[in-house]
């Protein structure tokens, strides 16, 4: 089931997590119960800190990396101390058989595959081995808790990003575009990652039986390169060169689907539409050798889902968008129609002269050269480092749009004296800013009313 996009409510200028608080609390109890008695207080403190940070309790940005490392370490150790070690101490024949079949060490992101293995193990336990059956049930509870914990570890970085900006995103526009893109990339990769192993397994079995359609589709640029160069000795895990080729194929699939397709589509919308927020990502396996990777975006009740549907065997590679209504119904959209939908539903707080100027400028072919946002005082603030020699046309278009919409323009700070002298000739004036001296230009004409 794909996520229904929503929008975040700001509290203390930090967006709360999308992780279910009750579910995370249950996951915390599960991990704590499996931890070694000597480390249980430490485990409970780390999980409690994560839960509190995502419930609006706040957390210093500098402590985020340490918390993530601690939680991952203790969650992995809980599997050893709470699942594997008790099986090793048991003398019951059923427990010994389960121990032999149970995965001893695995990557947390592979929870789905490991859960499938444990479920198969559970079906083979004799009915009279009640204690062993209960223990395997605890192992399944642990594995079912991992997706929530992994999402929480991703979302806590979003809390850190919000704390760094110190301003609500609906007031500033895409001031932290790199942060938003990084969040989109992390969520898309986290959704795709658990399924890469099975995709690679299918393609490894198929690659020697004839050409795959992916090799003829430009959308599979990196995947095609890997498929066209399989190891001569075979692609099995036991074959020489097989494991390395499999890792390369997994990275290529992720690069084509996430880095080359989904994130650029999201980036174009995030760059143009202030207040647009990154939501959840999900992956749905499809028939054949592919599936569908989704990423939700939303603003003020308007929901969008960007998708990449693919099949490496047939060569299908489709990038599309859908509008999502309040009841979860989806309507297919062309990517350009997504712009029209967002332009037709601009919240009042984002319909200021500076926001209108920014939307106009984002439609230009050379808009990527402008890193801009609407600052807390309502000015269109532009990063001066992105105006180079030969960008006179870009600067001219910027000022024309600002004048026609009635927006002030600010370059802050300005340390390039050549740029500064050129801006002064265009009626910019020096002001003292928080980061140093800046140049501000009032609009040359009166503000135009919306819709005029």
Image (cartoon, helix red, strand yellow):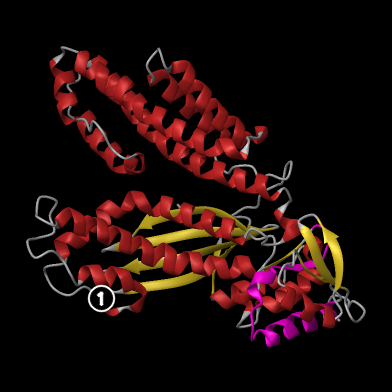
Q: Position of residue 392 (x, y in %)?
A: 70, 86
Residue bearing mark 1: 215
In the displayed structure, does residue 216 sit left or right of residue 381?
left
What residue is at 58 percent from the left and 55 percent from the top?
A: 179
The residue stretch that appears in magenta: 376-405
Q: Residue at x 29, y 20 (%)?
A: 135
Total marks shown come to 1
**Is 404 inside the magenta-drawn segment?**
yes
Q: Residues within 10 Å of mark 1 (few under 14, many from 20)?
A: many
Tell me where residue 370 appears, x and y as whole percent.
65, 74
What x and y, as percent, mark residue 109?
A: 36, 43
Residue 218 in sight from this viewpoint: yes
Lateral position of residue 333 relative to residue 391, left or right: left
Q: Does residue 4 appear in the picture of this structure? A: no
Residue 438 at what x, y percent from top left? 80, 65
Element under disc 1: helix
The residue located at (51%, 27%) in the rendering is 47
Does the magenta portion include 227?
no
Q: Of 191 and 437, which appears nearest the observer?
A: 437
Above or below: residue 296 compared with residue 450:
above
Vertical placement of residue 325 versus 417, above or below: above
Left or right: where 41 falls relative to 250: right
């Amino acid at each position: 089931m794909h996520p229904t996009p929503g929008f975040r409510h700001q509290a203390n200028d930090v967006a709360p997590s999308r992780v279910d608080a009750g579910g995370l609390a249950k996951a915390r109890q599960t991990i704590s119960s499996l931890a070694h008695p000597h480390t249980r207080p430490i485990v409970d403190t780390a999980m409690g800190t994560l839960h509190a940070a995502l419930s609006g309790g706040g957390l210093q940005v500098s402590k985020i990396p340490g918390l993530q490392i601690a939680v991952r370490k203790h969650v992995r150790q809980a599997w050893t101390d709470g699942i594997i070690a008790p099986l090793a101490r048991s003398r019951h024949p059923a427990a010994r058989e389960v121990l032999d079949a149970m995965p001893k060490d695995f990557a947390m992101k592979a929870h789905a595959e490991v859960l499938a293995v444990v479920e198969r193990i559970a079906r083979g336990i004799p009915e009279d081995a009640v204690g062993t059956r209960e223990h395997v049930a605890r192992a399944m509870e642990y594995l079912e808790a991992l997706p929530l914990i992994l999402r929480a570890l991703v979302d806590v970085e979003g809390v850190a990003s919000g704390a760094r900006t110190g301003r609500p995103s609906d007031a500033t526009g895409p001031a932290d575009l790199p942060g938003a893109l990084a969040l989109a990339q992390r969520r898309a990769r986290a959704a795709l990652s658990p399924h890469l192993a099975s995709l690679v397994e299918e393609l490894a079995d198929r690659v020697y039986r004839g050409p795959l359609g992916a090799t003829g589709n430009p959308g599979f640029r990196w995947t095609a390169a890997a498929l066209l160069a399989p190891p001569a000795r075979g692609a099995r895990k036991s074959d020489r060169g097989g494991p390395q080729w499999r890792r390369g194929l997994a990275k290529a699939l992720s690069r084509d689907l996430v880095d080359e397709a989904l994130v650029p589509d999201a980036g174009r919308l995030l760059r143009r539409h202030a207040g647009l927020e990154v939501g959840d990502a999900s992956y749905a396996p499809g028939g054949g050798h592919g599936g569908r990777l989704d990423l939700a975006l939303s603003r003020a009740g308007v929901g969008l889902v960007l998708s990449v549907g693919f099949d490496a065997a047939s060569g299908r590679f489709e990038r599309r968008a859908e509008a999502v209504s309040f009841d979860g119904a989806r309507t297919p959209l062309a990517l350009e129609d997504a712009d029209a939908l967002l332009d037709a539903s601009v919240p009042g707080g984002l319909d200021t002269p500076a926001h209108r100027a920014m939307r106009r400028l984002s439609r230009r072919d050379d808009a990527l050269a402008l890193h801009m946002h609407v600052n807390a005082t309502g000015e269109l603030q532009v990063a001066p480092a992105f105006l180079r020699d030969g960008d006179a046309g870009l600067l001219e278009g910027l000022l024309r749009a600002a004048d026609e919409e009635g927006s002030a323009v600010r370059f802050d700070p300005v340390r390039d004296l050549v740029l500064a002298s050129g801006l002064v000739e265009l009626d910019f004036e020096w002001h003292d800013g928080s980061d140093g001296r800046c140049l501000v230009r009032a609009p040359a004409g009166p503000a135009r009313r919306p819709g005029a």
